Amino acid sequence: MVVPSVLLGLGAYAAGLPHTVDWMLLPADKFISWVLWLAELFSREFLPSVRLAPEFGATLLMVFGLIGSCVLRTRQFSTLLIVLGMLWGFVLFQNKTTLEEGEFEVTVLDVGQGLAMVVATPAHVLVYDFGPRFGSFNLGEAVVLPHLRGEGHRQIDAAIISHGANDHAGGFSSVLDEFPLRKISTGEPQKTTGDNCHLQADAPWVWDGVSFSFLRSLPDGVREANDRSCVLSIKGKYGSALLTGDIEMPAEQTLFQHYGNGLKSDLLQIPHHGSKTSSTPRFLSATRPQYAALSRGVRNRFNHPDQGVVGRYEEQEVQIGDTARDGQLSYRSLREGWQVDSFAKDWARFWH
């Protein structure tokens, strides 16, 4: 109904009959309005709390195929549904990476101009920041929760709110409403829920052969909220990562004073979305990352990242992943080395 109506409208316009275009497009308008109304009705009244795993679609196809093979005389269509369901399930299975002792995965979610990361070990999961909130809409509900459900997580072993800025903490409440949280830490306990991460510095804990530790990053007489961000060091058997939140030059200097070249990390979350106030030459020389993850929004109002900052990473031949360009980023520290993926890479099309 929609396509014929639109084609007729375009034809009428091309034929020089602009007054008839509205009438031609009316069926498409009514049909789309009805579909949107129906979708809103179901999401609000009938299915607001139903959560479907990605595997559900594959299972549903196979079930319909089996039912069809029993009811219909012709089995070609039923067989097609079963085969499609099996292929779908196979693809989902192939995309699942089972982690072993000492391995870990850092997923940088695409939450626009904000930050949300999920760190997984074989039997534990940690969430570092939850993306922004805009009125009734927030990226915790729209992005973080679907990712956690899709990965099959049932609880969060540790939640870290780097600091109180909306683009990092805005989505936290939605995740808290659905997932049990064993431990919550924050860089600004006066603004957000959680224990002060700066009072937990240099007190590592170990999950599945992977060590986690907050670092001493809080400058003396700190003024900027960004510099209160929790800095988390992750050291596995085969690789390391450093999550920095929005730290700026003072916090970077404090880290260097305490740890020097001990900051060396294979993967670095680029501080403060690539702002010119961060990623100082000394800090980059100390961390010497092989990979750097940049979380930012497309054409954001802050003009992040600063091109001078990007140049510093490029001078060190660091491979930069950019959520605005690549979508969701995935970094797996495995026995055979680092495995790096992105949404743009995994779902590339020939026109990209």
Image (cartoon, grey):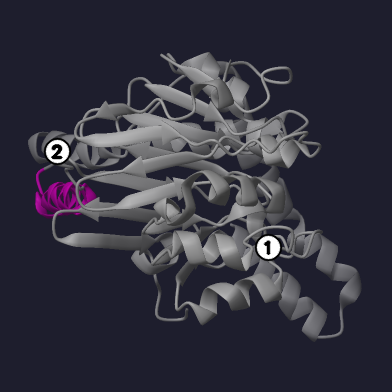
Q: Residues within 10 Å of mark 1 (few under 14, many from 20)?
A: some
- Asked if residue 87 lies left or right of residue 38, the reply is left
Instruction: Please tell me the numbered disc located at residue 184.
Output: none
Q: Residues within 10 Å of mark 2 (few under 14, many from 20)?
A: some
Per the image, the residue denoted by label 1 is 298
SS of the residue under disc 1: loop
Q: Locate the N terminus by quadrant.
A: bottom right
- First to last magenta residue range: 73-96
Say whether disc 1 or disc 2 marks the residue closer to the N-terminus.
2
Image-quadrant location for residue 129: top right
- The amino acid type of the residue labelled 2 equals Glu
- Asked if residue 248 lies left or right of residue 216, the reply is right
Per the image, the residue denoted by label 2 is 101
Q: Which mark is nearer the camera, 1 or 2?
A: 2
Q: Is residue 272 magenta?
A: no
SS of the residue under disc 2: loop
Image-quadrant location for residue 20: bottom right
